[in-house]
Image: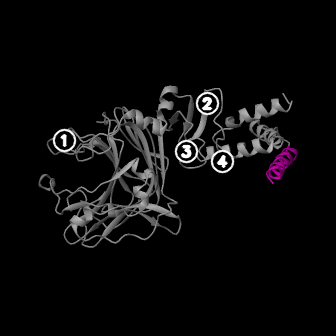
């Protein structure tokens, strides 16, 4: 059956060549010869080739030694993560709100997904409150972050997606936040496909955070009380020590978009500038007070009744929904660090063990030998495309659109073995 499948494929390729007057490209010739080569492989080797290819195609950049981004803020990064929430098996019903502040803060995870390694290795759901900081702010209501507000939801258009919820209850504002376990990002390109829905009185945010003074943040913020085409991009702090607005720190973008619909938001934190894109279009560039020190990454949905978010009506709610998150980044220092509120985290771990577990030691030692792109030639979101390979051998089984070099070793061995070279 396998041989018949490859015979059909090779025949189809040959017929397509015969019906055109144009000169076949190197890629098409390679594919044709490769098909003929595979036909003559022993069944055991043929099966091994198929299994190897299938496995490699599921690797979202594991063979890459560095990752390149495009645009005027383009850069090279040593690490890559892609979190896809579109087909999570444990997605289900929306959890009911917990009406007590204490029980809300102490709530457990809403599904097994949030206790598995795929989540906990990179993210930590928060349960802190603003009780101790309210006196130093203009918040008018107690805000409580609850794990109960981070859940996998279903959708008629997509199998599942991640949701962060905030809701105004009788005695407090229930909110949602998760922080990266990595607290030493030192420049990154973060993207997420997201939408914001619900009532006025909330803020959706994706931002870097360093728990020290002075504040250093690079932010994307959406206020549900504002126009649906307005998104704020900021290198914090947005006000100076006198309380005056730092106009050069913020761009209030009013692009041709509706944040209640799905959009791809991208933030590139680079050494001299932070740049923002929406759906691939550059919308803001700020060089003023660009964050300089290593930081974590935070995603949240919150409100506190203060002047920034406004006050939400009782029993109203708002949601930040996310289909996927993709981050290319560099790191500095030991893994872990401090959590957002300055409390020693439980994530401290020896860097060597973490690097080996994620395969980054190989990337660091080899440098940019296999360069992949998050933006160019990408056919499947979250799977970086191969740009070039300086190792002398291709990446085995790389996906269509990411380069044909991965098949060259198999092709050459086949040609030599069967007397064609």
The Cα–Cα distance between marks 4 and 2, rounded to whole angstroms, is 21 Å
Residue 54 got which mark? 4
Task: Give the quadrant of residue 187.
Answer: top left
Q: Mark 3 and mark 4 in contact (Cβ < 8 Å)?
A: no
**Crowdedness of circle 3 by 10 Å Cα count: few (<14), some, many (20+)?**
some
Q: Which residue is mark 2?
A: 389
**Callout 3 secondary element:** loop
The Cα–Cα distance between marks 4 and 3, rounded to whole angstroms, is 12 Å
Residue 6 % position (x, y): 80, 48
Q: Which residue is mark 3?
A: 60
Span colored in magenta: 1-20
Q: Mark 2 and mark 4 in contact (Cβ < 8 Å)?
A: no
Residue 3 got which mark? none
Earlier along the polypeptide chain: callout 4 or callout 2?
4
Q: Nearer the viewer, mark 1 or mark 3?
A: 3
Residue 1 % position (x, y): 81, 54
């Amino acid at each position: 059956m396998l041989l018949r499948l490859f015979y059909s494929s090779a025949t189809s390729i040959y017929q397509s060549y015969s019906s055109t007057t144009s000169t076949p490209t190197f890629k098409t010739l390679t594919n044709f010869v490769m098909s003929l080569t595979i036909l003559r492989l022993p069944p055991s080797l043929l099966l091994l080739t198929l299994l190897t290819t299938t496995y490699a195609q599921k690797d979202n950049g594991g063979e890459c030694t560095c990752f390149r981004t495009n645009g005027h803020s383009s850069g090279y990064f040593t690490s890559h993560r892609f979190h896809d929430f579109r087909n999570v098996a444990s997605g289900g019903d929306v959890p009911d709100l917990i009406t007590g502040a204490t029980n809300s803060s102490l709530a457990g995870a809403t599904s097994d997904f949030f206790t598995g390694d795929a989540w906990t290795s990179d993210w930590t759901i928060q349960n802190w409150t603003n009780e101790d900081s309210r006196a130093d702010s203009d918040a008018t209501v107690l805000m409580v972050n609850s794990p109960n507000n981070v859940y996998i939801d279903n959708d008629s258009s997509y199998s599942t997606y991640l949701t962060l919820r905030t809701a105004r209850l009788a005695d407090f504002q229930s909110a949602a936040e998760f922080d990266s376990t990595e607290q030493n990002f030192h420049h990154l390109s973060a993207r997420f496909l997201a939408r914001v829905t619900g009532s006025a009185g909330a803020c959706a945010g994706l931002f870097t955070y360093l728990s020290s003074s002075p504040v250093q943040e690079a932010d994307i913020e959406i206020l549900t009380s504002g126009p649906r085409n307005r998104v704020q991009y900021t290198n914090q702090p947005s006000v100076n020590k006198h309380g005056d607005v730092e106009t050069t720190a913020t761009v209030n973008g009013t692009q041709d978009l509706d944040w209640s619909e799905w959009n791809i938001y991208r933030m590139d934190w680079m050494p001299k500038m932070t740049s923002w894109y929406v759906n691939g279009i550059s919308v803001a560039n700020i060089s003023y007070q660009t964050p300089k020190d290593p930081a974590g990454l935070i995603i949240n949905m919150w409100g506190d009744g203060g002047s920034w978010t406004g006050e939400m009506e009782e029993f109203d709610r708002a949601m930040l929904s996310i289909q996927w998150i993709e981050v290319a980044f560099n790191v500095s220092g030991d893994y872990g660090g401090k959590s957002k509120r300055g409390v020693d985290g439980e994530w401290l771990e020896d860097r060597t063990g973490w690097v080996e577990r994620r395969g980054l030691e190989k990337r660091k030692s080899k440098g940019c030998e296999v360069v992949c792109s998050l933006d160019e030639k990408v056919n499947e979101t979250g799977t970086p495309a191969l740009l070039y390979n300086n190792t002398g051998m291709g990446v085995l089984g790389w996906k269509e659109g990411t380069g044909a070099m991965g098949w060259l070793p198999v092709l050459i061995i086949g040609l030599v073995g069967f007397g064609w070279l």
